[in-house]
Image: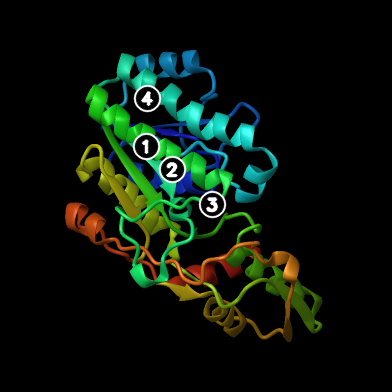
Amino acid sequence: MKALVIGAAGFVGPYLCKNLIDNGFDVLATKLENENSKGDFKFVNLNILKKEEIDALLKEFAPDVIFHLAAQSSVKLSWERPQLTFSINVIGAINLLESVREFAKNAKVVLIGSGEEYGQIDQSKLPVKEDAKIEANNFYAVSKATQNSIGRIYAKAYGLNVVSVRAFNHIGVGQLDTFVIPSFCKQVVEIEKTNKPGVIKVGNLSSKRDFTDVRDIVNAYRLLALKGKSGETYNVGSGRSYKIEDLLNIILSLTNASVKVEIDPARFRPVDTPEVRADISKLVKDTGYKVKHDLKDTIKEIMDSYR
């Protein structure tokens, strides 16, 4: 089975490519020309804003399944550059689906969205289900919610085999330290290296989020490519919420360094949801998905990678 992974040079892409190859897929990965390839995979350059490049690639490779990871995924940058965010996340998705409609109509397309699409989740309705009201409250979230709607239209109007994902927080080795868990791990390891007491800066520790090891996330993507129902949206996460403070305490338990925790108001979001937890029963029912990795082990791996 031939799998095309679009936007594979980021954090998630190499994990997905490895999972697919380990499960017998013939994988071709794409990246932007100025990006470095990660992993021992077959890479080609692709700009999703140039539809003619997608056309040529689909005609040449003829994939059975396409995973669309390419995105402007920073919430912060989406506030600064909303035009860029919508160009990549919306126009890019349309370019891909138009190319699929013309040159690879039988291919299964997995569109990767975000739990951010739900926005301010009604705390009385946790865990959040796929049919919950979408209250996207930043430009990144709105762009991904729009991608989701576009995917449903292409499935219904043109008969394309499109499955959409709303992925919740995922962590692992290689994630940028702009994200909360690698940020904590990196700061603690930097203190370790000084052999002196130190301070780490943190934001809101009371928030609870649905965290999952990235290897479980990409396994869900593969299962959805095989078993997901066209036109449907699936939450992908652990189905559990973890208090940020509890994850920080795991990190602190893994070091002998003397670490003082200091609250930094600059690290707080202007609007924050107390708890986010995904209902993954639909994913489990349709694919048999199971979470296999313990987050404490994942955090230890991230700490060791910084060491």
The relative height of residue 59 versus residue 132 in the rendered view (above or below) is above
Label 4 crowding class (10 Å Cα cut-off): few <14, some 14-19, many 20+? many
Q: Which residue is mark 4?
A: 97
Tags 3 and 2 touching, CB below 8 Å: no
Q: Which residue is mark 1?
A: 149
Question: Where residue 244 sits in the image (x, y, percent)?
Answer: 55, 74
Tags 1 and 2 touching, CB below 8 Å: yes
**Mark drawn on residue 141:** none
263 relative to 128 in the view: left or right: right
Q: Amino acid at mark 3?
A: Asn
The relative height of residue 175 versus residue 275 in the rendered view (above or below) is above
Q: Splitting the image into 4 quarters, where does residue 241 fall?
A: bottom left
> Which one is earlier in the sequence, the residue at label 4 or at label 3?
4
> Which one is earlier in the sequence, the residue at label 1 or at label 3?
3
Question: Where residue 55 sits in the image (x, y, percent)?
Answer: 42, 15
Closest to the observer, 154 or 54: 154
User: Disc 3 versus disc 2: distance between alpha carbons?
Assistant: 11 Å
Q: Residue at x 38, y 18 (%)?
A: 99
**Mark drawn on residue 145:** 2
